[in-house]
Image (spheres, grey):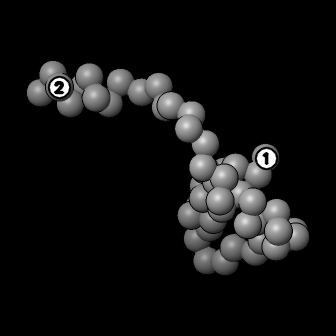
Amino acid sequence: MLQRNLLYTGVTRGKRLVVLVGQPRAVAIAVRGVTGRRRWSKLQEWLADR
């Protein structure tokens, strides 16, 4: 669960206050964890059709 995209989603969805509970090292691992996973969306195809 220490994935950058999950941390980003959780933090950016906070409206007024976000509190991270955990070890600073775990947050650092999540922030540095850039996965090379490709997103499978049709955005490129949709934009090419226009």
The front one of 28 and 48 is 28
User: At which x and y percent is residue 9?
Assistant: 60, 55
Residue 44 visible, this orientation: yes
* Helix, strand or loop status at disc 2: helix
Q: Secondary structure at mark 1?
A: loop
Q: Quadrant of residue 10?
A: bottom right
Residue 4 position in % (x across, y down): 64, 53
Mark linked to residue 39: none
Kind of residue at badge 1:
Met
Neighbour class for label 2 at 10 Å: few (<14), some, many (≥20)?
few
Residue sitting at x 65%, y 59%? 32
Image point 75% across, 60% down: which residue?
Answer: 29
| Label drawn at residue 1 | 1
Distance from disc 1 to disc 2, alpha carbons, whole Å, reads 34 Å
Could you say where residue 49 lies in the image, as x and y percent from the top left? 15, 22
Q: Which residue is mark 2?
A: 48
